Amino acid sequence: MRILVTGGAGFLGSHLIDRLMTAGHEVICLDNFYTGNKRNILQWLDNPNFELIRHDITEPIRLEVDQIYHLACPASPVHYQYNPVKTVKTNVMGTLNMLGLAKRVKARFFLASTSEVYGDPDVHPQSEEYRGNVNPIGLRACYDEGKRIAETLAFDYYRQNKVDIRVVRIFNTYGPRMLENDGRVVSNFIVQALQGKPLTVYGDGSQTRSFCYASDLIEGFIRLMNSDYVGPVNIGNPGEYTILQLAEAVRDMINPNADIIHEPLPSDDPRRRRPDITKAKTLLDWEPTVPLAEGLKLTVEDFRQRIGNAAI
Ligand code: NAD
Ligand code: UDP
């Protein structure tokens, strides 16, 4: 098949491209390199089945493809809040453009949505039926409301124009290739520990997240895309940790002497998050296989190769 991956030069997009290329598909990667990097897709640049297009999805584009994985959007709060209006444009105009493309060429359309649509959840764990608790005017709204309207657009194109959609809600995912300056918690802690700096826990560290390793997530993507179920489907690892526990795990793995310091909690920071993955299990026969300790080890190794190890 000929498959378009928007945001393909980013963290998750590049892992997805590895899987699709290895399976023998033709892949077109569309990216404006805002948080993506050519390094992530370097190994495919000379492959005749691979094409890279520098393009901003807020502008329309005409291509002939069979499937679209729509991932383009900065995912880290640091990057999506840097230019919030642009984040809204990417989610609204960008998703509209990609759905328009899917409609024109009758391609199956996969939306990378997020657990952020549940906001600061008052239901725990979060199942797909939960409608969320999102602040529409907060600092995170450009992203979480942006993704909510992206889901709305996908379902309206499905109902109105019969576009064949799949919607995944991704919970916190980590792994090799996250940017050093990504700003999300796993990469921050690893980089800080490797550089001999204190690990910065925001607030008292009692807020929780559930961390999924990248390869597990991509397996879930492929299964959902090739299933008959439209979604939304939660894909994530139900293992739930406090941020302080995560800091201690990273510290103990890299540099037991590193300090853990506390910094102010950003506004609207969700207090807890854990996916109910019953749907993924029953409909896709999917569940995560990589435990946090093992995934962290692989991720630390990747960062060590890129930035060295000043700490020890
Ligand atoms: P990332 O920032 O590494 O990748 C995003 C990619 O999209 C980058 O390559 C960036 O350059 C590109 N991009 C951004 N705006 C664009 C635009 N206007 N036009 C073209 N390209 C653009 O993030 P990621 O972690 O790989 O996330 C990928 C997708 O998965 C995002 O849609 C994100 O919302 C979603 N997601 C990720 C997580 C996670 O934990 N990693 C969790 C929930 C949802
Ligand atoms: N966080 C932290 N230190 C950091 C970066 C993040 O304590 O250096 C916290 C952040 O406040 C949040 C959690 O870790 O409670 C996860 O943050 P991240 O940005 O990775 O993802 P999100 O909040 O979008 O789930």
Image (spheres, rainbow, N blue to C red):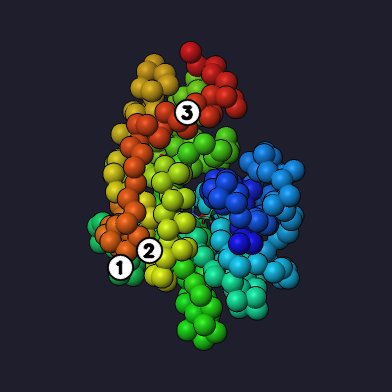
Q: Amino acid at mark 1?
A: Tyr
Q: Cβ(mark 1) to ligand 1 < 8 Å? A: no
Task: Give the SS element for disc 3.
Answer: helix
Above or below 168: residue 15: above
Other residues around mark 2 within 10 Å, as few (<14) / some (14–19) / many (≥20) = many
- Residue pictured at 71% horizontal, 45% vertical: 47
- Residue pictured at 34% horizontal, 46% vertical: 288
In the picture, residue 290 is in which quadrant?
top left
Can you identify the residue that label 3 sits on?
Answer: 300
Note whether residue 99 is visible.
yes
Can you identify the residue that label 1 sits on?
Answer: 130
Task: Give the SS element for disc 2.
Answer: strand
In the picture, residue 135 is in which quadrant?
bottom left
Residue 156: horizontal and vertical position, in percent?
50, 81
Can you identify the residue that label 2 sits on?
Answer: 233
| Marks 1 and 2, the one that precedes in the sequence | 1
Residue 133: horizontal and vertical position, in percent?
35, 65
